Image (spheres, rainbow, N blue to C red):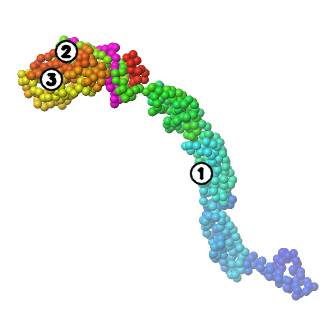
């Protein structure tokens, strides 16, 4: 039966009438027998796969399972199954052989499954073996796994950089994907000043230009061969190729002696203003400007004060406006002249006796004038007013203080009387001058001339005058004294000298009853002399201090005869410096009407003196607030 089936099979395969040949007696029996046996052997091998009576087993089947991305690349682990294929009537054991890549050969008598997680390309080779040791043809397959996202691209910029991260030229942009072996394309877009719709570029690089001023934001990512995308990268590009649109400078008020205040304006539509560079020059041209200061200011306006300039000098001022990209626009220069400088302390001190055009703020003084404080029981001099037509001369200048003295006396007939006149005379004189002859706008304060002013410029030695500085005790019969005497450093009504007032000091008015003490003592402080070139530093001080009519000095003193103490105020009569008593320790009094001699002290940090004028009586040095 098998022979017949084989003949039928061969007849169908080879197209020969094998059965007919076998029964045809005309054919040589031996030859035909050999041919038939050979063909039967070939058919037997072929039928082995069909009938299971195998000499060569069937090849195994390999199946793959996983998630695929682009280009048949798996983006997940891959499950591999290798199945054994048996013939229809095959009996016996079939052994499975397989290898993963070039690894060791593995065997199994059953189907196998395993998972591949390693990225890259994996090759599976499998074959089977029957009990006779015959091997099937190899079954092979390869697959690629790519689970990892591609690396984020890099963005590089090429252009001329200004300041603060701004470019001042067009900017070339290069996006680089890196590893070329696993990159399909780059996607990017630009938003903002220079918009570009989302674009896909194949390969590992993409190039384009930013040509529009302003802020542009680049976004890019990579797509790999499996279709996976990288993280996005962004890059901000600030570009400003245009200088600021405006730059102007204007004076803010009148210039000072060494300073000028200006207001500058600037604008920049793209990056904005970053700073104002304030410059100056003493030349009229556009060259030679010196930078005073660069002021960091992002506003469209900036006020600045040029300082430490030369007085009476013409300056050309300009501002250079800088934007955040570092581009600049200069303004047109404006010119102005600083004020002439006032005379210095040294210069003023060398002009003692020269006239200054000082005008006090017109005032009056009535507070504390009258019998309660001045002792003037007649009620005269209730109000004192500024005397017009007084001119002022330089007495001293040092330590930023200019001291002026009036060229004549004022307010004649100011009466001081009795112990209250002694108690309050110095303070009344000072306060009257302060009220009538000050000028707060010029930093000027009035006071009365006093004995300390005279002593500063005299060469006469007051300590050689009779009993000056010696200690005395009045007669027990004449023990009265004004109450302020107890606070003077030269009076000791209780055996202890006072500690509050020098001869010209007093800061509060004094009221109260007259005191008496048989034990009190005092130091002699009265003296007199005639001002001349032999007793003063120079004739110019004699001329400044001489007085007619008699003038009060805001300074007290005490002297003594054989039994009485005399409480006095210093005076000047002509060129004679002396004193007249107002109260006596025997409780007697005198009433004396003398003139006032005002002094003015001016703070030179607040004024300029001598911008005009030469110090003459008709052309005095000017004085004005700074």
Quick check: is 384 in the magenta stretch?
Answer: yes
Kindly identify which residue carries mark 2: 592
Region of the chain picked out in magenta, as a range: 379-404
Q: Which of marks 1 and 2 is in front?
A: 2
Which of the 4 image quarters holds residue 498? top left
Check the image and report above or below for 86 versus 148: below
The crowding category of the residue bearing disc 3, from other C-alpha atoms within 10 Å (few below 14, some 14 to 19, many at least 20), is many
The crowding category of the residue bearing disc 1, from other C-alpha atoms within 10 Å (few below 14, some 14 to 19, many at least 20), is some
CA gap, disc 1 to disc 3? Answer: 104 Å
Q: Position of residue 536 (x, y in %)?
A: 27, 24
Looking at the image, the residue that sits furthest to the left is: 477
Quick check: is 468 in the magenta stretch?
Answer: no
**Which of 111 and 583 lies nearest the eye of the viewer?**
583
Element type where label 2 sits in the image: strand
CA gap, disc 3 to disc 2? Answer: 18 Å
Q: Which of marks 1 and 3 is in front?
A: 3
Locate the C terminus and report the quarter of the image it occupies: top left
Element type where label 3 sits in the image: strand
- Name the residue: 39% across, 24% down: 609
Q: Can residue 372 be seen in this view?
A: no
Q: Where is residue 94 in the image (x, y as percent from the top left)?
A: 67, 78
- Name the residue: 85% across, 85% down: 34
Q: Do the residues labelled 3 and 2 touch (CB within 8 Å)?
A: no
Element type where label 1 sits in the image: loop
The disc placed on residue 232 is 1
- Name the residue: 85% across, 83% down: 35
Which of the 4 image quarters holds residue 514? top left
512 vs 395, left or right, is: left
Mark sitting earlier along the chain (1/2)? 1
């Amino acid at each position: 039966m098998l022979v017949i089936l084989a003949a039928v099979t061969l007849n169908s395969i080879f197209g020969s009438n094998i059965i007919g040949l076998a029964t045809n007696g005309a054919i040589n029996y031996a030859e035909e027998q050999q041919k038939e046996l050979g063909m039967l052997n070939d058919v037997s091998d072929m039928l082995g796969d069909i009938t299971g009576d195998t000499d060569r087993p069937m090849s195994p089947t390999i199946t793959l399972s996983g998630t695929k991305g682009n280009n048949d690349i798996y983006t997940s682990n891959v499950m591999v199954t290798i199945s054994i294929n048996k013939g229809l009537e095959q009996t016996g054991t079939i052994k499975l052989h397989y290898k993963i890549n070039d690894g060791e050969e593995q065997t199994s008598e059953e189907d196998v499954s395993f998972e591949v997680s390693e990225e890259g390309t994996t090759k599976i080779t499998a074959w089977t073996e029957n009990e006779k040791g015959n091997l099937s043809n190899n079954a092979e397959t390869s697959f690629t796994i790519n689970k990892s996202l591609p690396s984020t691209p890099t963005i590089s910029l090429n252009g001329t950089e200004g300041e603060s991260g701004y470019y001042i030229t067009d900017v070339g942009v290069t996006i680089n994907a890196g590893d070329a072996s696993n990159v399909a394309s780059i996607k990017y877009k630009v938003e903002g000043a220079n918009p570009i719709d989302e674009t896909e570029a194949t390969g590992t690089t993409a190039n384009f230009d930013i040509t529009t001023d302003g802020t542009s934001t680049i976004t890019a990512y990579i797509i790999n061969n499996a279709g996976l995308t990288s993280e996005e990268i962004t890059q901000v590009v600030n570009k400003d190729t245009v200088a600021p649109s405006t730059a102007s400078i204007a004076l803010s008020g009148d210039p000072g002696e060494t300073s000028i205040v200006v207001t500058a304006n600037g604008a920049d539509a793209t990056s904005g203003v970053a700073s104002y560079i304030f410059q100056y020059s003493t030349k009229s041209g556009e060259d030679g400007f010196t930078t005073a200061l660069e002021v960091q200011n992002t506003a469209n306006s900036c006020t600045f004060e040029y300082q430490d300039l030369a007085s009476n000098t013409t300056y050309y001022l300009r501002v250079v406006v800088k934007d955040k990209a570092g581009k600049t626009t200069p303004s047109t220069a404006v010119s102005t002249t600083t004020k002439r400088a006032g005379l210095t302390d040294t210069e003023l001190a060398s002009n003692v006796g020269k006239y200054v055009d000082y005008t006090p703020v017109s005032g009056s003084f009535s507070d504390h004038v009258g019998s309660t404080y001045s002792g003037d029981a007649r009620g005269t001099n209730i109000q004192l007013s500024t005397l017009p037509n007084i001119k002022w001369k330089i007495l001293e200048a040092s330590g930023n203080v200019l001291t002026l003295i009036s060229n004549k006396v004022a307010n004649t007939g100011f009466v001081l009387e009795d112990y209250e006149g002694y108690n309050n005379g110095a303070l009344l004189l000072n306060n009257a001058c302060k009220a009538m002859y000050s000028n707060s706008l010029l930093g000027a304060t009035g006071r009365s001339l006093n004995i300390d002013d005279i002593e500063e410029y005299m060469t006469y030695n007051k300590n050689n005058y009779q009993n000056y500085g010696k200690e005395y005790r009045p007669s027990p019969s004449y023990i009265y004294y004004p109450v302020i005497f107890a606070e003077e450093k030269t009076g000791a009504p209780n055996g202890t000298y006072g500690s509050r007032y020098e001869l010209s000091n007093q800061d509060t008015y004094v009221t109260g009853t007259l005191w008496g003490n048989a034990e009190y003592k005092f130091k002699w402080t009265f003296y007199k002399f005639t001002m001349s070139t032999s007793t003063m530093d120079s004739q110019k001080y004699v001329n400044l201090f001489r007085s007619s009519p008699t003038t009060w000095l805001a300074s007290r003193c005490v002297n003594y005869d054989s039994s009485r103490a005399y409480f006095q105020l210093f005076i000047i009569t002509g060129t004679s410096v002396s004193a007249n008593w107002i109260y006596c320790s025997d409780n007697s009094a005198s009433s004396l009407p003398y003139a006032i001699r005002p002094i003015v002290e001016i703070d030179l940090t607040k004024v300029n003196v001598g911008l005009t004028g030469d110090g003459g009586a008709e052309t005095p040095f000017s004085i004005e607030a700074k």
